[in-house]
Amino acid sequence: MAAMTLYQSVGTLQSCRNNGNSGLCPDYGHVSFRSVSKGFKVDVGLLRGGSFCSRKRSTCVIQASASQATVFDEASAPSSATTSDSNKKTSEAALILIRHGESMWNEKNLFTGCVDVPLTTKGVEEAIEAGKRISNIPVDMIYTSALIRAQMTAMLAMTQHRRKKVPTIIHEESEQAGAWSQIFSEDTKMQCIPVVTAWQLNERMYGELQGLNKQETADKYGSEQVHEWRRSYDIPPPNGESLEMCADRAVAYFTEHIEPQLASGKNIMIAAHGNSLRSIIMYLDKLTSQEVISLELATGIPMLYIFNEGRFIRRGSPPAPAEATVYAYTKKLAQYRQKLDDNV
Ligand SMILES: O=C(O)[C@@H](CO)OP(=O)(O)O
């Protein structure tokens, strides 16, 4: 597809429809809009990452290929942006969040929490599919929980990345582990992506619900009680962690370790869990303890944020390569993708 890529002239976002709200779209979900470029109309159909649409006077550049079109927002794009994986010239960086693919206990409908179970075949496929969605987005560092389902997801997703860097787990559990996993070639190091594993990103500890069947538990205690344990902000399951307690460690880890990397221009992927990611999204999107109740994350669907000038801008989930949709890349991300296309 590389040769088919073309840049059309700057167009103006003319209308944006979402629940009848012309010109103003929420940060979530898909929106459809039409863009009018000088002299000709372009119907670009679906747009993901509604933050692009939130400014009525936004201008966009349309990059079209035979299979898929991408759109990026000129207004938010620094002109000095480069196409390197890690851009030190601007503070913009990509943050990808992925909930692991289906695990063997998701399949059996068991409360899992911190029990360390692997992915199912479906989960493996979801992780690979997630990788295809982010295969054009730069990744300089990966953070995963200490649990195998998140680590499998990160590794499988990266097998699909077009840059073909190798995710390499950092072992710092002992001095010897660090020493024995050293790489002695600078060139090889440049082709590696460090993977940091952190227990703080683990799923919330589900206490005495771990290993119980979710349906049977709802039948026994009532679905309202079980929903409260599963989705409320501050009510913990018996001897387990509430979302608030989970946030105390997951969000603290994010702000202490991951945010500084983003601020230095590093593009980051985090592979973690339904509830540890809910707590991080609550922080990123400034959700209230009421709003977070209805936040549900699907397995294996990556979500992209742009970190710019200390702010997190939600961009939704990048489309799979086969999807005929338009995605609101930033200029920097569009240039990165273009560079990958040029090197094919
Ligand atoms: O069992 C778990 O650990 C979690 C995620 O699968 O369940 P829930 O959907 O209740 O957050």
Image (tube, grey):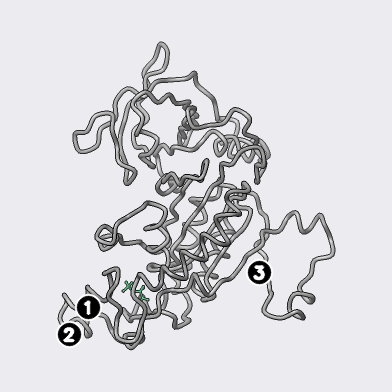
Left or right: residue 117 versus residue 137 is left
Task: For the residues labelled 2 and 1, say whether their Cβ atoms are less than 8 Å apart.
Answer: yes
The earlier-in-sequence mark between 2 and 1 is 2
Mark 3, ligand 1, within 8 Å: the answer is: no
Foreground tag (3 vs 1):
1
- Residue 258 or 21: which is nearer the viewer? 258
* Mark 3 to mark 1 CA distance (whole Å): 37 Å
The earlier-in-sequence mark between 3 and 1 is 3
Quarter of the image for residue 241 reads bottom left
* Mark 3 to mark 2 CA distance (whole Å): 41 Å
Residue shown at 59%/35% (left/top)?
Answer: 335
Q: Which residue is mark 2?
A: 221
- In the rendered image, the residue lying farthest to the right is 184
- Residue 75 or 85: which is nearer the viewer? 75
- Residue 250 or 305: which is nearer the viewer? 250
* Residue 248 point in image, percent of width and height: 43, 69
Q: Which residue is mark 3?
A: 169
In the structure shown, which secondary structural element does the residue marked by tag 1 occupy? Answer: helix
Q: Which residue is mark 1?
A: 226
Residue shown at 46%/32% (left/top)?
Answer: 71
From this view, report whether residue 74 is shown above or below residue 254.
above
User: Which quadrant would the C terminus be assigned to in this image?
Assistant: top right
The earlier-in-sequence mark between 3 and 2 is 3
In the structure shown, which secondary structural element does the residue marked by tag 2 occupy? Answer: helix
In the structure shown, which secondary structural element does the residue marked by tag 3 occupy? Answer: strand
Left or right: residue 228 versus residue 30 is left
* Residue 244 point in image, percent of width and height: 36, 70
* Mark 2 to mark 1 CA distance (whole Å): 7 Å
Amino acid type of disc 3? Ile
Foreground tag (3 vs 2):
2
* Residue 249 point in image, percent of width and height: 47, 71
Residue shown at 78%/58% (left/top)?
Answer: 188
